[in-house]
Structures are given as structure tokens and as C-alpha cells.
Amino acid sequence: MMQALHLLTISTYVVLPLLAAVVLLRPAEPSVRQRRLAGFILTAVAGLALGGTLAVTYAIGVGGQPRIAQILLTGYFGVSLLLLLRFYDSMLRWLAKLPVAWLQPGLLHKALAGLMTTGRLVLLFGLGLPYLLSTVLIYRPKTAHFNNPNTMLNTSYETANFVSTDGIRLAGWWIPSDPPSHNVQKIDPDWGKRTVLICPGLTDTKSTQVLMASQFVPYGYNVLIFDFRAHGDSAGQLISFGDKERQDVLGAVRWVRQHHPEGSAQIFGVGLNTGAAALIGAAADPSPEGQALDAIAVDGIFRDFDRWSDSAAGRFFPPPLSWLLQMFGVPIASAQTGVDLVHFSPGKLNEAIWPRPVMIIQTARDPVVSYEQGRRFFDLAPQPKQGLFLDRYDEDRISHNPRVGMEIRQFFQTARPMPVI
């Protein structure tokens, strides 16, 4: 059902501007054609402005540069959004006129007309605004980043092109561990045989999180860092906050095992917020790729997406908009992404990772996931588990925090599944 709604929604976004252009070509009175043309031009200009502003603002916000093709594509998407809202408003206008048409002009006619107009506006904004905001939140304009492991870490790397388990083209970087000295190899015979998957967060890409590799590569770990779908150089434009992205992680595991079997003696994962949710979903998967994840460390993880989104709506939007988003935002996003976000629960999925160990990291001032949500996730998680809770703001980025990197490495070095009796 959700997948059918997703396909219908995407098809509508693609076709709607073309259908609107066809309507303009239909024979009509000159005055009617002028109104149609004026309405279409106004909607097109507003949609292009909306899309262009979204693409440029997003690029600046994530520290990248906007791509011309993405600005145009997002502009087209903006036109589709506004055309859909105009169609919705037209339907409401038509429905509002039906009861009034049965009455003769008079006081009752005016009262009913006013009531129907008020109802139309309530429905227009009550569903239109949550639709617009939730759609903007799941759409990702691609941005250009010029950092890479060589410029940032002065280390060698190779590009990794692979597909998710549901066929989405993904892009990543394979960064081999630093060559060990003779003494180090004696102390650590597993040097270069272990790999860490780095799963970036909500607005991150492999370029913005490449520094995290510095916590592992010099210590004998290979690293695969990749762009999730709809991010960086990977395909797609819509995100699902970790639900579909679990298949990206499984695709990454498959690629490592196929192309670098010598580095697959142990495979670990490090994920940030939505990347952490995807990592948990992948580790819980019963496939060989899912079961190949020996241990994972998650930073800023929410237990239930529905509760997390309600909390975020309350923090970032004032009433009554926050209430509308809490009621309608997640179902609308679910219909467009093709997954049931209402019931998406990394906390419940985490139970399926047992008996493999999980490390849960949470900072007090995490802008994406609150400290309380991270603590709740840890408290309800089954053993074996390890917690790291930081109350200083300058300790919120794994890539910039040697202490956190050391804790994660120690966790991976000692991580063993709980004995099953």
C-alpha cells in the first residue's frame, strides 16, 4: 500500500507540470486562456523561486555548494508542489459551493457561504501546511563538496560505487588502514583485517564526515564511508530517516565482503542519528549482510520515529503548526516515501541485534536527538550494551573528539557476542 502511494506521488510530481502545460493549449475563450496562462506563470515563478531557495539554502546550511542541475530539478519539484496545492484548493472551492447552490440568496445563504469558506480555509491550511513542510523535510537537493580523504587526512583512498539491496546507486570511499610497523603488527595481528562502516547523519555526506575516519585508519581499521540515498553523489532525492536507508548499509556490507575479503574478518558500524537508525535496521536484518555486522556504535539515536518527530515539531515550530505536523506530518511523509514511518522503531529493531553488542552515545546538546531520548534508548536496550553520555557541548562530534574515538575503538576491540545458552 505504502509503496503504491509512493509511486503514485512520484509520478504525480513528474507529470503534473506537463499536464498543466497541456491544459493551457486546450481551446478556450481568450479571457479564459489569459487567466489560465497568468495562473500558470504565477505558480511556475513561485515554484521555481521556492525550489531554488530551498536548494541554495540547504547547500549553504550543510557547508556545500549548490549544483545548477539540482536547483533546476528542485525548482521543477517546487512547481509540482504548488500545482498540487492549487488543485487541492480548487477541489475544496468546488465542494464548498455545492451546499450553497441549493439555497436562494438571503441571510441563510450568506451564513452558509461564510461557514463553507471558513471550512475550506481550515482544510486548506490544516492539511496544506503539514503537507508542504513534511515534503520539504524529506526532499534532499544534492550539493557539491570538494573534500576527500586525501585533502582532509592526507591518506590514500579509492572510490566505491555499489548499489543498495533494493537497487539504488550509491557512492563511497574506501580508506585502507595505515601500514603497520613491524612491532605494531606483532602486538595487533588483526591490523588491517577489520573494517568500520561510517554512516553519516541527517544532513551529512561522506565529505562532511570524512574526518571521522581519522579515529580508525591510523589504528589498523579500514573505513568505508558512503553517501546514503538522496545525499552527496548517490542517487535518489527522498529520504526516509533510516528506514529504507538500512538497505544502503546492507549494500555497503556486501561490497566490502566482495571487494575486500581480506579486510572483512570483522565488520563494525558507526552511525549518527538517522544513519544510526539505518545501521540498527541493517544489523537487525536476518540476511548474511546484516548478520556480518559484528558490533555497532550509534550516536544520537531515537527509539521511535513518531515520538522523535513529535518532539522535533514541538521544538522547532510554534502552535498550532506543531500540532498539525504531529497529527498529519508523519503519515504524509510515509505516503511519499513508501514506508510506514509511524511504526518505524529503531528501539524495537535493536532487540533483534542480540546477542551482538551495541554502544550508545549521546550528548547533552545534540541538536537532532534530545539527551532524554538517547538515555531512554539505552535504558530499554538489551544486553550486551555500553553507554557513553557526554554533558559538554565541545564533545558532540565524534570526528573532533579523540576521547570518543578511543572509547569506540576499545569497544570494538573487546566487543563479543553474549554467549547463547
Image (cartoon, grey):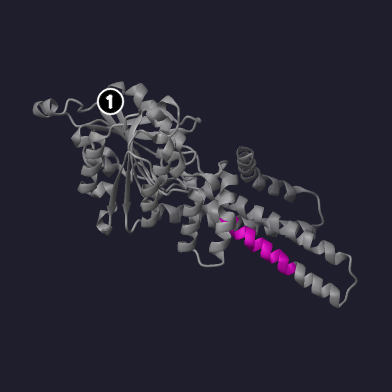
Q: Circle 1: is it few (<14), some (14-19), or many (20+) Cα within 10 Å? A: many
Percent position (x, y) of residue 121?
68, 66
| Residue sitting at x 58%, y 57% | 327
Q: Quadrant of residue 413?
A: top left
Name the kind of residue labelled 1 in the image. Gly
| Residue sitting at x 76%, y 70% | 115
Pick the residue in front: 123 or 176: 123
- Give the structural element (helix, strand or loop) at label 1: helix
Q: Main secondary structure of the magenta part?
A: helix
Pick the residue in front: 372 or 421: 421
- Image side of residue 172 versus residue 332, left or right: left
Percent position (x, y) of residue 168?
49, 33
Pick the residue in front: 400 or 314: 314
Percent position (x, y) of residue 261?
31, 21
Q: Measured along the vertical axis of the image, is residue 109 above or below residue 179?
A: below
| Residue sitting at x 62%, y 50% | 80
Q: Measured along the vertical axis of the image, is residue 414 above or below residue 73?
A: above
Kindly tell me whether residue 247 is visible in this rendering.
Answer: yes
Quarter of the figure with the N terminus: top right
Percent position (x, y) of residue 283?
40, 34
Quarter of the figure with the C terminus: top left
The reply to whether the magenta stretch includes residue 118 is yes
Q: Which residue is mark 1?
A: 263
- Image side of residue 252 versus residue 387, left or right: right
Magenta region, residue range: 117-132
